[in-house]
Amino acid sequence: MQDVASSRRKVFAAGTRIFAEGEPGHEAYVVEYGRVAVFKTVKGKPVPLGTVVQGGIFGEMALIDDQPRMASAQAEEETACVVIGKDRLTAQLHQAPEAVQAVVGALLGNIRLMGAELAEARVVLAEDRP
């Protein structure tokens, strides 16, 4: 991983793991260019959840709900990201009304559950294929 110009931007070489499932989250990322694969590991195998491209954000959930990373992220090609630190995002969220904060928390819980269920379903479907 290479820092570029300022600490608010990072460039990742193709194949670089940006973060791993289960790690604490201290940064979120906005893709300037490149492509990032997001995946969970189920039964020792990577299960794709999606791809993030220019303008997309990833890694934000762990910053908001203080839970470990629900998935891993890896650069599929050289990728530059703007880095958003936890303190910056937390300060913005604390300015939102409590009802909005509660809704965001509920949504994140649902997304985490759906991500786990999606990964499990993909594994089951793959095992059922001849």
Image (cartoon, rainbow, N blue to C red):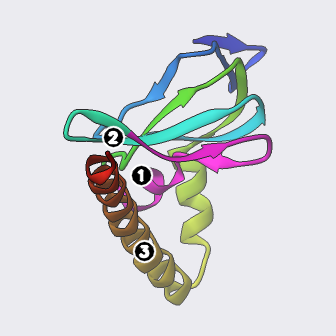
Query: In the image, what residue type sits under mark 2?
Result: Pro
The numbered mark at residue 62 is 1
Mark 1, other Cα within 10 Å: few <14 / some 14–19 / many ≥20: many
2 or 37: nearer the viewer: 37
Looking at this view, is 35 or 42 the one in front?
Answer: 42
**Residue 25, can we see it?**
no
Q: Residue at x 62, y 24 (%)?
A: 76
Mark 3 highlights which residue? 105
Q: Which element is circle 3 on?
A: helix
Marks 1 and 3, the one that precedes in the sequence? 1
Report the Cα–Cα distance between label 1 and label 2. 7 Å
Residue 120 drawn at (x, y percent): 28, 56
As drawn, which residue projects farthest toward the bottom? 99
x then y, percent, for residue 75:
59, 25
Task: Name the residue tied to disc 2.
Answer: 24
Image spot of residue 65 (x, y percent): 39, 61
Whether the residues at callouts 1 and 2 have beta carbons within 8 Å, the answer is: yes
User: What kind of residue is marked 3?
Assistant: Gly
- Residue 113 visible in the shown view: yes
The quarter of the displayed image where residue 114 is located = bottom left
Residue at 33 percent of width and 39 percent of height: 21
Dot 3: few (<14), some (14–19), or many (≥20) neighbours within 10 Å? some
Tell me which segment is drawn in magenta: 47-67
Where residue 130 sits, quadrant-wise, is: top left
Secondary structure category for the residue under label 1: helix
Q: Quadrant of the N terminus?
A: top right
